[in-house]
């Protein structure tokens, strides 16, 4: 670990031209490189939208909601931060315009400004700077702050002004600006264009920010001429115009490509920090296994409610990839909408898969398709993994089709059901506000050592992250246990069911928590590792049921 030298340094990452360029991935990759050079790094994202947090936003609007250990509902980019670096994020890792404005307005209502006129500058920008400053500490050498949105957006202006002020206050030696931009290839002209990037930097310069490093997203390799033009018109040193070309196989190649261009070296030099040796051997071995898996491929079916937007299940897909790496196998994902299962049947859409995963979600749309899917996996002895709502649907399916509880359901979908095997948590019944009020964050779980989950974890006590309002109804535990359901994970002190399994099945595990949030490419989550391993062992047993419908692979 590097020796602390002075205050926490700050790196600010902005984006231009278009959204979805990958600022989150770039931030995570840079954090990995700096960490692998011995520096203690923390990451943060500032989002310009007015929602207080993403918790009440539709997955179609925002993608998945990532949950931190301390129970914050955050942007999905924090998942990239944790997966790449293994550094836990907290509530201080994600602030929105909504949370910033709420804090300022609350303080004004309480008389905190002593009658002053409250304005964007200095009050909103001061609150943003306080959010940035929350990462400072003796245990943080470098703080990386990503600014969501695109330069030029009206809602981004207070954040850009705040980071301009912040860098002025801490000094150029203690902070730098990185701008991620697009160098598009115009097919009709047969050439790449630097003008959009020049204009994006021009907007930044009008508010007093001059990038120290320019990272250019592109489909084709840039020439020396492109770099020279960008350096000249954007006032950036030519060696600090960095190419970030689309990677061929996986997002986990990005740090290797950035390291090849010494971008982390330039960052450390500009921040006055010693350039320690870079240790990437383990990361490179992982990427090599991912690109050329020694055990071939295994196909997993993911049956969800929000399949049309792949970011809705981003952490699920990544965790499956991690499980594949741990087993030396590539994972091909067949993405299936649960509503389609209701129309065409599970056999038609899932024949031939070696494992089936049903992820979380909210609302009754597509629920019966999930339940049919789980019945198909149970009856045909296909390795099955249920997560959150997937666990609840597994309970409903077992109650209906094994225990004889016709019409069993969750009170979320059927409040008057005679068999409410899933019911709202007692403390949730008094909750009226939606945002940030679910059972959120890490909670302990005690596991039976001789269970499938116990063998996967290799220990009896675990801690996992949650995001739910409904739980298994203990009124039905004894009856379902007699029928063959194993309640292998229980929250101590609360007696809440956290994990269920089936005794007479090759691999059938469902959990109320979200294990995908604690999986990384270097350390696959035990349940994902076990699930993919079971699918690999059972591969080929479902060949007779293969459908003609081609699989849709997901690239990390």
Image (cartoon, rainbow, N blue to C red):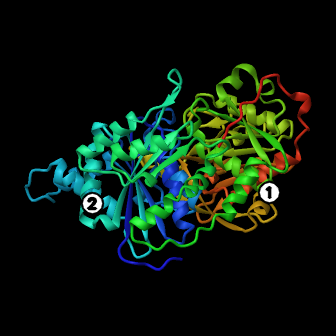
Residue sitting at x 54%, y 51%: 79
Residue sitting at x 59%, y 35%: 310
Which label belongs to residue 452? 1
Q: Position of residue 140 (x, y in %)?
A: 43, 71
Which quarter of the picture shows residue 432?
A: top left
Residue 14 visible in the snapshot: yes
The residue at which mark 2 appears reads as 166
Whether label 1 touches label 2, CB < 8 Å: no
Sequence-first tag of 1 and 2: 2
Residue sitting at x 36%, y 77%: 6
Name the foreground residue: 266 vs 48. Answer: 266
Q: Is residue 449 left or right of residue 411?
A: right
Q: Position of residue 235 (x, y in %)?
A: 33, 49
Answer few, some or many: residues within 10 Å of disc 2's Cα (few below 14, many 20 plus, some between 14 and 19).
many
Q: Nearer the viewer, mark 1 or mark 2?
A: 2
Q: Position of residue 441 (x, y in %)?
A: 52, 57
Which label belongs to residue 492? none
Q: Residue furthest left?
A: 115
* Screen quadrant of the C terminus: top right
Name the foreground residue: 206 vs 331. Answer: 206
Spatial CA span between label 1 and label 2: 51 Å
Residue 440 visible in the snapshot: no
Name the foreground residue: 200 vs 262. Answer: 262
Answer few, some or many: residues within 10 Å of disc 1's Cα (few below 14, many 20 plus, some between 14 and 19).
many
Q: Position of residue 492 (x, y in %)?
A: 62, 65
The secondary element bearing badge 2 is classed as: helix
């Amino acid at each position: 670990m590097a020796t602390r030298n002075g205050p926490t340094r700050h790196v600010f990452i902005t984006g231009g031209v278009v959204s979805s360029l990958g600022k989150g991935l770039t931030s995570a990759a840079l954090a990995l490189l700096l960490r692998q050079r011995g520096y203690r790094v923390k990451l943060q994202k500032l989002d310009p939208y007015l929602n207080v947090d993403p918790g009440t936003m539709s997955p179609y609007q925002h993608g998945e909601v990532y949950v931190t250990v301390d129970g914050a509902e955050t942007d999905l980019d924090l998942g990239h931060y944790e997966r790449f670096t293994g550094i836990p994020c907290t509530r201080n890792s994600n602030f929105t315009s909504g949370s910033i404005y709420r804090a300022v307005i609350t303080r004004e209502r309480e008389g905190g400004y002593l009658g002053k006129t409250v304005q964007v500058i200095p009050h909103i920008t001061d609150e943003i700077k306080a959010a940035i400053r929350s990462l400072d500490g003796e245990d943080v050498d470098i703080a990386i702050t990503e600014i969501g949105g695109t330069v030029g957006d009206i809602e981004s202006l207070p954040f850009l002004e705040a980071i301009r002020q912040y860098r002025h206050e801490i000094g150029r030696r203690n902070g730098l600006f990185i701008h991620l931009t697009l160098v598009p290839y115009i097919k009709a002209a047969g050439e790449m264009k630097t003008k959009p990037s020049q204009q994006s930097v021009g907007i930044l310069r009008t508010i007093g920010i001059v990038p120290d490093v320019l990272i250019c997203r592109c489909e084709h390799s840039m020439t020396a001429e492109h770099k020279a033009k960008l350096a000249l018109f954007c006032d950036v040193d030519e060696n600090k115009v960095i190419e970030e070309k689309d990677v061929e196989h996986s997002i986990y190649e990005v740090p290797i490509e950035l390291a090849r261009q010494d971008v982390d070296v330039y960052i450390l030099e500009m921040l006055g920090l010693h350039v320690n040796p870079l240790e990437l051997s383990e990361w490179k071995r992982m990427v090599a296994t991912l690109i050329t898996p020694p055990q071939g491929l295994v196909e997993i079916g993911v049956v969800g409610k929000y399949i049309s937007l792949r970011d809705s299940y981003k952490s699920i897909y990544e965790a499956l990839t991690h499980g594949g790496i741990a087993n030396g196998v590539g994972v091909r994902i067949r993405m299936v909408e649960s509503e389609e299962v209701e129309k065409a049947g599970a056999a038609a859409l899932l024949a031939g898969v070696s494992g089936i995963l049903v992820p979380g979600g909210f609302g009754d749309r597509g629920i019966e398709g999930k339940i049919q899917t789980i019945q198909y996996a149970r009856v045909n002895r296909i390795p099955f993994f249920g997560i959150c709502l997937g666990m609840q649907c597994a309970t409903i399916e077992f109650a209906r089709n094994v225990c004889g509880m016709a019409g069993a359901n969750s009170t979320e979908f059927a409040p008057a059901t005679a068999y409410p095997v899933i019911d709202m948590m007692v403390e949730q019944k008094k909750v009226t506000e939606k945002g940030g009020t679910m059972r959120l964050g890490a909670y302990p779980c005690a596991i039976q050592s001789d269970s499938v989950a116990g063998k996967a974890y290799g220990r009896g006590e675990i801690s996992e992250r949650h995001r739910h309002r409904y739980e298994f109804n203990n009124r039905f535990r004894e009856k379902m246990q007699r029928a063959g359901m194993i309640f292998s994970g229980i929250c101590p002190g609360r007696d809440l069911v956290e994990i269920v399994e089936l005794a007479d099945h090759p691999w059938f595990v469902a959990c109320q928590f979200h294990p995908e949030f604690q999986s990384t490419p270097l350390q696959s989550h035990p349940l994902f590792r076990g699930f993919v391993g079971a699918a690999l062992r059972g591969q080929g047993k479902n060949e007779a049921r293969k459908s003609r419908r081609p699989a849709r692979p997901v690239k990390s």
